[in-house]
Amino acid sequence: MKKQIALTVLAGLAACSQERSVTGPPAARAVALAASVQAVDGAQRAVYTLMNQVSGNAVAIFQRAADGTLTAVGTVATGGTGTGSGLGSQGALALSDDGRWLFAVNAGSNDVSILRVTPAGLVLTSRVPSDGTLPISLTVHGNLLYVLNGGGSGNIAGFALDNGGGATSIPGAIRPLSGPNVGPAEVAFSPNGRWLIVTEKNTNAFDIYAVGPDGVAGAPTLEASAGIQPFGFTFGLRNELFITEAASGSVSSYVIGSSGTPVLVSGAVPTDQAAPCWAAVTKDGRFVYTANAHAGTISGFAVGTDGTLRALDANGVTATVGAGNLDLAISENGRYLYQLRGNGPITALRVEDDGHLTILGVVGAMPGSVAGLAAR
């Protein structure tokens, strides 16, 4: 039995890591978006992904039309470098709460780029060291930025953001993971900013850090996962935490209490699909989706008022999008779901009233190194 579980975990790791060589990468170039990219508030209406190339990292930009369809409009260099292969993580890109800033990991140069989102396009404002090696995920809440470094023993590191697009390391805000070689996958703030969560693929557990008023994270508390190999996760509207479990092919829901203690609600609910690795929740909190790396599908779940999960489809297939899933993102207006694939294409899907998904189109041709997805 132990041998079987170990093999299952290894298979899940391989599926979600998506490590490939780069073939035919296009040269990164800065672009200004046309006025048609702007939303009504003057900000960009776009979807972003990260090229993650050794020759020079860049953010690829896709204009989002009012009907949810996408058009590739170019790239903006981050100033750093990538790794040339998949990062095996969720959250390599993140937007600020107000959508005015985009943050990107440069896993090859061990730093983070901050880009301003303007009506004319993205503008690189600064690069800051990640206070570790191999940054693979990041999260923002208010004026706080935390980065998950996957290299070496791994750590999280906190930064204070300023109004000019810069960031400064917070003294005492570098914290270890539960141990070395834990296989971290994602870091994210809880909606109220009081807690940081980090999933660990190799320990079948996740870390919870309390964040003080000064922005300093405390020591990690390790919580056992309900399923095998916790990977990506997302938060609901009522302190729910939804975590994918790649090796057991499942997703679990928890409710985070006022003390930060997670209470299991629905444990290891099967997706009936192989290697669910990435998760996204609709803006109204009614539906959760997982991107299933081996199956090339998306599974949808209805969320009860108590955080329980119910599969939308008996076979776990809410949409078939093709092999090589890498990430998911929901548009700012909550109407559209976007899915990134390993060889670059992004699939646009409309979220129907009952949570089912309608494919609107597929766009983009990028290198196999792509990582992360963010949407406005």
Image: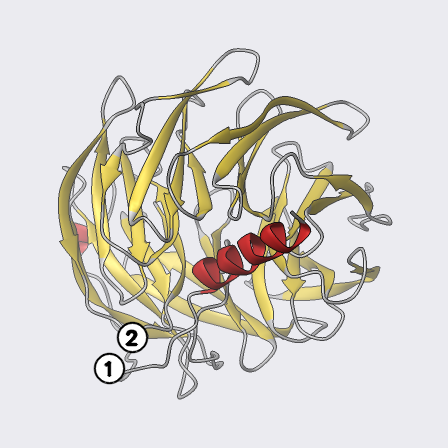
Q: Mark 2 points at which residue?
A: 367
Q: Is residue 239 above or below residue 291?
A: above
Residue 118 shows which numbered tag?
none
Left/right of residue 331 with respect to residue 144 in the rendered view: left
Residue 77 locus on image (x, y percent): 38, 77
Residue at the spot 38% in from the left edge and 46% down from the top edge: 292
Residue at the front extreme of this rendering: 1
Q: What element carries label 1?
A: loop
Q: Residues within 10 Å of mark 1 (few under 14, many from 20)?
A: few
* Pointer 2 or 1: first along the chain: 1
Residue at the spot 27% in from the left edge and 83% down from the top edge: 23
Q: What element carries label 2?
A: loop
Visible residue check, residue 20: yes
Q: How crowded is mark 2: few (under 14 residues within 10 Å), some or many (20 or more)?
A: many
Q: Nearer the viewer, residue 211 or 359?
A: 359
Q: In this view, does 209 lie above or below 72?
A: above
Residue at the spot 41% in from the left edge and 34% down from the top edge: 271
Disc 2 vs disc 1: Cβ atoms closer than 8 Å? Answer: yes
Label 2 vs label 1, nearer the camera: 2
Q: Mark 1 points at which residue?
A: 26
Left/right of residue 316 with respect to residue 127 in the rendered view: left
The three-letter amino acid code for the residue at tag 1 is Pro
Visible residue check, residue 42: no
The three-letter amino acid code for the residue at tag 2 is Pro
Residue 367 locus on image (x, y percent): 29, 75
